Image (spheres, coloured by chain):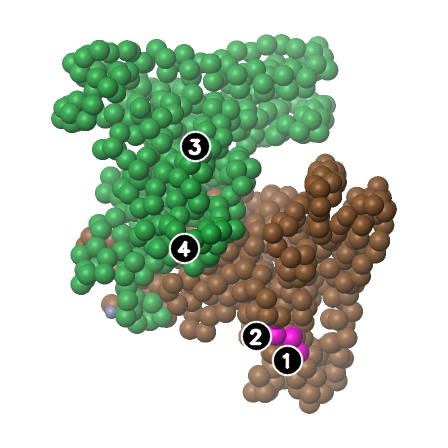
Chain colours: A brown, B green
Amino acid sequence: MAPLTAQQDNFPQWYQDVLTKAKLAENGPSRGTMVIRPNGYALWERMQAEVDQRIKSAGAHNAYFPLFIPMSYFEREAEHVEGFSPELAVVTHGGGKELNESLAIRPTSETVIGEYMAKWIDSYRDLPLLLNQWANVVRWELRPRIFLRTTEFLWQEGHTAHSSEADARDYAVTILRDVYEDFMRNVLALPVIVGRKTPKERFAGAQNTMTCEGIMRDGKALQMGTSHELGQNFSRAFNIKYSPADGSPELCWTTSWGSSTRMVGGLIMGHGDDKGLVVPPALAPIQVAVVVVKDNDGAVTQVAKKLTQDLMARGLRAKLDDNLAQAFGWRATDWDLQGVPVRIEIGPRDLAEDSAAIFRRDTQSKERVTLDSVADQAQRLMTTIQADMLAAATARRDALITDCTTLDEVREVAQTGIARMPWASVGTAGEQELATSGVTVRCL
Amino acid sequence: MAPLTAQQDNFPQWYQDVLTKAKLAENGPSRGTMVIRPNGYALWERMQAEVDQRIKSAGAHNAYFPLFIPMSYFEREAEHVEGFSPELAVVTHGGGKELNESLAIRPTSETVIGEYMAKWIDSYRDLPLLLNQWANVVRWELRPRIFLRTTEFLWQEGHTAHSSEADARDYAVTILRDVYEDFMRNVLALPVIVGRKTPKERFAGAQNTMTCEGIMRDGKALQMGTSHELGQNFSRAFNIKYSPADGSPELCWTTSWGSSTRMVGGLIMGHGDDKGLVVPPALAPIQVAVVVVKDNDGAVTQVAKKLTQDLMARGLRAKLDDNLAQAFGWRATDWDLQGVPVRIEIGPRDLAEDSAAIFRRDTQSKERVTLDSVADQAQRLMTTIQADMLAAATARRDALITDCTTLDEVREVAQTGIARMPWASVGTAGEQELATSGVTVRCL
Ligand SMILES: [Zn+2]
Ligand SMILES: [Zn+2]
């Protein structure tokens, strides 16, 4: 297996190499789409499980809305499908004939969910209405990059309606903090920068857009989750009203929020190194690989199998690698590539000495320990590695951040890192000026 | 709330009433699509979790393939999209322009998965390749019925490749028995009839199609999951070959298998009664509802809340209903409608007597028990109700089955029930004759 391109030689090529060699994902048959292979999908499934659990704790319920949205929902005046937003994919034929009304593939379910919310909400007793959906969406993409920007991607989108501005605001913040930030920080071990977007970068129709920005190993920021306060703009457009305990119907206050398969890209670029992925234990689909280095009489395999079972009985996600048909070196390289946090290696010599080697993927350090303490050790490492990875990512992030006092300084710093400057000193004019140099204000 | 249409008056209308009144699902904005509401989606989520766990135990890995399939994958000769299968929905526009090649929305991912399998399989060491996908698919439907037959539906499709016919056959049977039948019998409490389809009813290209048929409360059978042995037909079409340890490349033996949101329809129609859904405990998103009947000083609510926590600590999915703004009768009717297996009702009088009422949804029986035994009782009922529901469904099923010796008898019986007759006595000719009377051979 040829080694990966080094990150500092060509970061985008390193990213592409990791996708291919770790068998995470590849291009689909039509432009801009991706095939997520089992190794990549396992990461997404774990993300889904953790985010979903937090969404449910925040009180939202999952539902499912259709893939097809009548074109009339987007604009009522356009005459031909070319008149619509270029991000839309449009179905013009179905059932073997041309359709009377073309159907868009959802770029988001916002419009449909708005319509049904209006139908489902009657009195204040129906509020808050807290909905979430896990689904695929399509936004035509001319410069696709797997996981980061694809024509079709997987995501969750939440839409909620409330009876007061304060309640909607609190909920948008709860999602931002208790769902996204908590997940990214404590599961992904990414010290995301959390804050508000400038009016210019805000979601259309939002009165406030909040974001979690992850800092990647090339020093760039990646938007990994957003939460919007929509005020009454959305409910006005969809006529989402409720009857209060007294008085006449009033418009609801709504929020929306989303996170997507882009988080897989964030995980890869936020922690990966020149040997491949580095996955934090709290996320890892496989936390411990128990590797039979060599075996002459089956004795090593037997011990390794028993150890794997012991680890699983402790609630760890462990996997036995007794694939002796493949050279040990090749397998070790592959476990590195997959970023499995801990690897336990056992060969005949280890067995004779009642010991095993325990390897940490994050620090690449190896230690010899006694066989009967190795499971304890692996279990303890889960907590240690998780904390160390967050600390290391935080140190990398902080090293990139420079406090600036002038726009010139900001421009300078933004070449290779992240500039921090009081918004009062930047302002909308400063933001516009920075934009001409390709610098974006990511987060307030 | 107006009562449901009685099953025996009009079963399809009863089904529609349950969907609407229990807020399970409704029609989407474009014909044939559905909006799955939180109550309905919670059922599907539980099904997904249970089926997914079994699929993983059978060794398959989840992956994700694109929604869009180039039209060339379907037929290479058709000139215009009207020339393609009427089940396809076709995207002709994207990125604001007409596409050079139209894209079909996947009716299944079979063709794409075949292409990638061919790419990923090299040697016998890559086999078996066991893939599964959870996704939405689209098949244009002229007579849609929610959950049973919709243009867009959610499903899982498995595709596997093996190095021998026996291995492929074993795997197809493992999926049928250990995934589908086990789930339907032990979680859904539906005593599905498991067997093979006749050559006429087989999936196109399959050399053997096996099915799980659920028996609904109107006496009709519903196909709830299928598993196909595809022999080498599929690998020949997609050139899926592997190199054996010795010798030249050989075609793989493949299987495919699927189950869908139709199972939600099967659950509703397999157990539901004139009061609504009846959900078996092993599936139920809410297993126990703890209902505060009335409360004068908060004492009842406090006890009910503690009881709910106690139930949850025991691992039960319990929910507190302290919604005193709504009349108790209305709430009880709604819990019935939702089919929650056990309801515990507590009011001030119960509290004074240190007792509670415990209600079983399946038998509609109510018992008074002491407060300190009610959690134990509820926990025990989970097992009892699960077993009793399966037994009741089995008795209903068996009462519908009549052994027949002539085709005339079969025709007679099939009006209201299920006829059983040796296939040797029916045969393909008999099957054809029965088809003219609208009788289908469901399962061998
Ligand atoms: Zn046409
Ligand atoms: Zn056109």
Q: Nearer the viewer, residue B302 or A339?
A: A339
Q: How far apart are marks 2 and 4 (CA)?
A: 36 Å
Q: Which mark is residue B173?
A: 3
Amino acid type at circle 1 is Asp
What residue sits 37% from the left and 16% below the top?
B397
At a point 70% along the width and 41% down the height, the residue shown is A298
> Looking at the image, which is closer to me, B401 or B251?
B251
Judge depth for marks 2 and 4 and give the one in front.
4
As drawn, the label of residue B386 is none
Q: In this view, does A22 lie above or below A401?
A: above
Q: What residue type is labelled 4?
A: Ser
Name the chain letter of the residue that bears numbered label 4. Answer: B
Badge 1 sits on which subunit? A
Chain of the residue displaying label 3: B
Q: Which residue in the structure is indicated by mark 4?
A: B248
- The reply to whether the magenta stretch includes residue B92 is no
Q: Is residue A189 above or below residue B337?
A: below
Q: Mark 1 points at which residue?
A: A9
The reply to whether residue A324 is in sight is yes
Q: Nearer the viewer, residue A26 or B124?
A: B124
Mark 3–mark 1 CB contact (< 8 Å): no
Circle 1 packing at 10 Å, graded few (<14), some (14-19), many (20+), is: few
Q: What stretch is highlighted in magenta?
A: A4-8
* Amino acid, disc 2: Gln
Query: Which residue has dot 2 on it?
Result: A13
Residue B74, x across and y down, in percent: 27, 56
- Secondary element at tag 3: helix
- Secondary structure beneath dot 1 equals loop
Q: Nearer the viewer, mark 3 or mark 1?
A: 3
Residue at 46%, 29% in the rendered image:
B177
Marks 4 and 3 sit apart, C-alpha to C-alpha, by 29 Å
